[in-house]
Image (cartoon, rainbow, N blue to C red):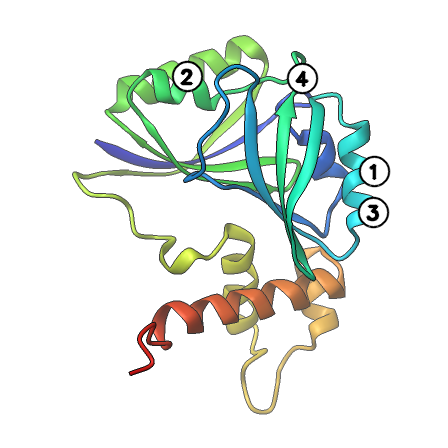
C-alpha cells in the first residue's frame, strides 16, 4: 500500500471554475456522505465570506448542472452538487482500482487529493490517465506503508495547515509578534480575511481535536 498526496488541475475538472472564482474560499468534499450513482451527485463543504459570490460562481460553472445548500452556517455551508457531462473526474478511477480518496480539497487552481493506493502501478495508471486527458497531475508526497498516513490528522485542511505553519515559522505567535496579519497574508498571496479565517478555524479545530474532552463529566 502507498499513501500519496497529489495536485490535479484542468479547466474541466469538476468545480475548477468555482475554485478559481473564489480565491479566498475553501472547498472540500464530504467523503463520508453517500453519492447518487445515477446523477454524479456529491456533497461539499464550502467556507467563504460571501455566499452570493459562491452561488454566482456555481451558477456559471460549466461543470455544475445543479446545486442546493442543505446546511447553512455563518462562514460555511454544505452544498449538494450535481456535475454536468462536461466535468472531468479522476476519483472514480481511483475507486475502480481499489484505492481510497482520503481527502479532497481546493488548492491553488485545482484540487489537492490525499490517496491510499494498492501500489505504484495504480499511481502510474492514474498518471497515464491524467496525461491522456490533459490533466496536470503532480505527485507531492509518497509514502509506502501498511497504515494510513497520519500527516493530516486533527481534521485540518491543507490550507489551514499552510497558514498555521507559516504563522508559526514567521513569528506570528511570538511575543513580541514578528509578523503582522497583513504581511502574513501577503506572504501567502491571499487576503487578510482569508488568512484570518484559516488561522481561526484551524486553531479551533486543533483545540477541539486535542484539548476538548467530548465527555464533560
Q: Position of residue 110 (x, y in %)?
A: 61, 34
Q: CA distance from mark 2 to mark 1?
A: 30 Å
Residue at which label 4 appears: 84
Residue drawn where x is 60% and y is 91% of the image: 176
Q: Residues within 10 Å of mark 2 (few under 14, many from 20)?
A: some
Q: Earlier in the sequence, mark 1 or mark 4?
A: 1
* Secondary-structure class at tag 2: helix
Q: CA distance from mark 4 to mark 3?
A: 21 Å
Residue drawn where x is 67% and y is 30% of the image: 16
Q: Which of the 4 image quadrants contains residue 17?
A: top right
Q: Nearer the viewer, mark 3 or mark 2?
A: 3
Residue at which label 2 appears: 93
Residue drawn where x is 71% and y is 55% of the image: 189
Q: Residue furthest left?
A: 146
Q: Earlier in the sequence, mark 2 or mark 1?
A: 1
Image quadrant in which the C terminus is located: bottom left
Q: Position of residue 147 (x, y in %)?
A: 19, 43
Q: CA distance from mark 3 to mark 2?
A: 33 Å
Q: Nearer the viewer, mark 2 or mark 1?
A: 1
- Left or right position of 179 against 49: left
The answer to whether the residue labelled 3 contacts the one labelled 1, judged by CB atoms less than 8 Å apart, is yes
* Secondary-structure class at tag 4: loop
Q: Which mark is residue 52?
A: 3
Residue at which label 1 appears: 56
Amino acid at each position: 500500500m502507498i499513501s500519496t498526496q497529489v495536485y490535479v488541475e484542468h479547466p474541466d475538472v469538476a468545480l475548477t471554475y468555482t475554485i478559481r472564482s473564489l480565491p479566498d474560499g475553501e472547498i472540500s468534499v464530504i467523503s463520508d456522505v453517500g453519492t447518487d450513482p445515477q446523477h454524479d451527485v456529491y456533497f461539499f463543504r464550502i467556507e467563504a465570506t460571501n455566499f452570493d459570490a459562491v452561488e454566482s460562481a456555481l451558477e456559471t460553472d460549466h461543470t455544475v448542472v445543479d446545486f442546493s445548500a442543505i446546511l447553512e452556517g455563518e462562514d460555511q455551508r454544505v452544498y449538494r452538487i450535481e456535475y454536468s457531462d462536461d466535468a472531468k473526474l479522476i476519483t472514480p478511477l481511483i475507486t475502480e482500482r481499489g484505492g481510497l480518496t482520503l481527502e479532497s480539497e481546493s488548492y491553488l487552481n485545482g484540487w489537492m487529493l490525499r490517496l491510499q493506493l494498492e501500489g505504484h502501478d495504480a499511481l502510474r495508471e492514474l498518471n497515464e490517465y491524467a496525461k491522456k486527458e490533459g490533466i496536470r497531475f503532480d505527485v507531492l508526497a509518497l509514502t509506502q506503508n501498511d497504515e494510513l498516513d497520519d500527516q493530516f490528522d486533527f481534521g485540518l485542511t491543507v490550507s489551514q495547515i499552510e497558514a498555521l505553519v507559516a504563522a508559526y515559522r514567521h513569528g506570528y505567535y511570538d511575543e513580541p509578534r514578528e509578523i503582522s496579519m497583513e504581511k502574513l497574508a501577503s506572504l501567502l498571496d491571499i487576503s487578510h480575511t482569508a488568512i484570518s479565517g484559516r488561522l481561526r478555524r484551524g486553531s479551533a479545530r486543533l483545540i477541539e481535536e486535542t484539548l476538548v474532552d467530548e465527555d464533560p463529566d
